[in-house]
Every structure is written in C-alpha cells, then in structure tokens.
Image (spheres, grey):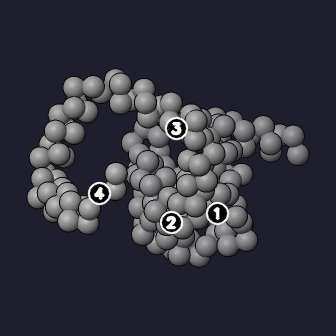
Amino acid sequence: MAESEERKKYRREWAKTHKEVGTLARRKWVSANRERVRETARKYRAKNRDKFAMQNVAYRLKHPDKIKNNNLRKSGWTLDAFNNALAAQDFKCAICFCNLRALPPKQIHADHCHLTNKRRGVLCHHCNAGIGCLQDDPEILQSAMTYLRRAL
C-alpha cells in the first residue's frame, strides 16, 4: 500500500526534528559494536576494491597540492617551505645542480635529516638515493670520494 503524501511529509518533518536523537543513538550503537562495524567495513572495502581505487585516483588528480603537502609534512616540510627552497636553489639540485624543472615531480625530493627531521634542501632522485644509500654519513661519503679519486 502506497504511503500518502501527508504521511510522507509528516515523516520528513519528524526526521528533521529527531535527527540529533538518531545520531546519538547511532554513535552509542557503533561504540558498543566497534568490532562488528570494522569487520563490515573491511568486507565492504574488499568487495568494492576497484571503486575505492578509482575514488583514490580521482582525489589525487583533483588535489595534487594536498597530497604533496601531506607527503612533505612527514619529513618536516611544508609546501611553502619546499617551494621557497626550490626558488632559493634556482630550481637546481643542491648537490649536482641539475635542472629540477626538467624532472617529473616524483623525482624531486625534499631532503631532511632522519635523526632530527631538520630540512636540508631539495635534491634530484639520484642525489637523494645516493646519500640515502650512504646512510647520510659524512665519513662514508668521504670514503666513497677517496675511492673514486683513487680509481681515476
């Protein structure tokens, strides 16, 4: 049996006035059934993996600055500090002086000390990987320089 328009209107008005009560009841139920909610969400995400992947890609394409800023924050940088450092370095790598504008964004790295999280500069991928492989240790780097000079 179809619901009358008057009844539908009454239910909409009731829902508006009692929304807060329903929200509080929902919060209470969720906190009491936290594991059940998590398991249901996990199953839904597994079943709709492609949907979530597409949403993630769309969000990343729509908000590249937010993604970049979040990634920079992990290493003690902000987007403004990164852009200022790039400009101060004349858009060149702090070590090899290659043109960073010619590189894809994923190959431009905000270098930082892993012990103190102190910002050091902006590097190309090769220089960042090089000092990372040498464990950010000046003595190992000096040893590598001596080795290279000796081999010439």
Q: Residues within 10 Å of mark 2 (few under 14, many from 20)?
A: few
- Residue visible at 56% across and 47% down? 52
From what the image shows, is residue 34 above or below residue 25?
above
Picture quadrant of residue 138: top right
Answer with mark 1 or mark 2, whichever residue precedes in sequence: 2
- Which one is nearer the viewer's eye here, 52 or 44? 44
From what the image shows, is residue 43 above or below residue 148?
above
Answer with mark 4 or mark 2, whichever residue precedes in sequence: 4
Contact between marks 1 and 2 (CB within 8 A): the answer is no
Helix, strand or loop status at disc 2: loop
Q: Nearer the viewer, mark 4 or mark 1?
A: 4
Q: Nearer the viewer, mark 1 or mark 2?
A: 2
> Which residue is the site of mark 1?
105
- Residue visible at 63% across and 50% down? 128
Helix, strand or loop status at disc 4: loop
Q: Nearer the viewer, mark 3 or mark 1?
A: 3
Answer with mark 3 or mark 4, whichever residue precedes in sequence: 4
- Which one is nearer the viewer's eye here, 123 or 146? 123
> Which residue is the site of mark 2?
63
Residue 36 image position (x, y, % from top left)? 35, 25
Tell me which amino acid carries mark 3: Arg
Tell me which amino acid carries mark 1: Pro
Gap between marks 3 and 4 measured at Cα: 35 Å
> Which residue is the site of mark 3?
45
Tell me which amino acid carries mark 4: Glu
Q: Identify the mark at residue 3; answer none if there is no mark.
A: 4
- Which one is nearer the viewer's eye here, 69 or 141? 69
Gap between marks 3 and 1 measured at Cα: 30 Å
Gap between marks 4 and 2 measured at Cα: 44 Å
